[in-house]
Image (spheres, helix red, strand yellow):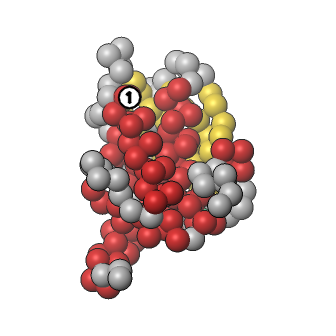
Amino acid sequence: MPDATLEELYREILLDHYRNPRHRGHLDDANHHADGSNPLCGDQVTVEARVGADGTIEAVTFTGVGCSISQASSSMMTVYVGGQSTAHALDGVQRFQQMMLAGEAPEDSDLGDIEALAGVAKFPARVKCASLAWKTLEQALRAADGGASAVTTDVKGVGDGGS
Ligand code: ZN
């Protein structure tokens, strides 16, 4: 059974990120960026990152419009990956996607507050909202320096494999 108190806490975390988004805005000296969209809901997220020569994500920001889940998830994503290595960030993307499929965080999860989004797994349409920022980040990090990339959840949606 879900713990009502925990659900309340998760709701608070989401609302806090939605109302007070972290790292929202343009990054002037970004060397990686990608645009993501989730046509199903109308969410749009652009992720910009400055990655150092050693692969460290020195700075990351997002801009976008959309539902509270998409925007809160974007904010949480920037907090998680800022200052981390690219490898660690991509690892986080994998963990996040596992969580969206399983409805709970993996055993070795270091996602922290991001686990507040685990409950979204129950609502397949909202999974795309929650995943958008992470897919866009992945796209941005995999793009060559200075390259732009676009991702849409209609093409590579988490959980699209049918069940
Ligand atoms: Zn949405």
Q: Amino acid at mark 1?
A: Thr
Residue 21: image location, x then y, percent: 40, 58
Q: Helix or strand or loop: what does disc 1 sit on? A: helix
Q: Is residue 66 left or right of residue 69?
A: right
Q: Is residue 108 left or right of residue 142?
A: left
Q: Residue furthest top?
A: 53
Residue 67: image location, x then y, percent: 57, 66
Q: Is residue 146 above or below residue 158?
A: above
Q: Nearer the viewer, residue 160 or 41?
A: 160
- Residue beneath the point at 44% across and 70% down: 119
| Count of picture labels | 1
Q: Is residue 124 above or below residue 32?
A: below
Q: Nearer the viewer, residue 25 or 84?
A: 84
Q: Is mark 1 within 8 Å of ligand 1?
A: no
Residue 102: image location, x then y, percent: 46, 60
Q: Is residue 146 left or right of residue 59?
A: right
Residue at mark 1: 86
The answer to whether residue 114 of the structure is visible from this angle is no
- Residue beneath the point at 48% across and 23% down: 31
Quadrant of the rendered structure where residue 99 is? bottom left
- Residue beneath the point at 36% across and 14% down: 53
The answer to whether residue 92 of the structure is visible from this angle is yes
Q: Is residue 91 above or below residue 100?
A: above
Q: Quadrant of the N terminus?
A: bottom left
Quadrant of the rendered structure where residue 40 is? bottom right
Q: Is residue 89 above or below residue 131?
A: above
Residue 122: image location, x then y, percent: 52, 71
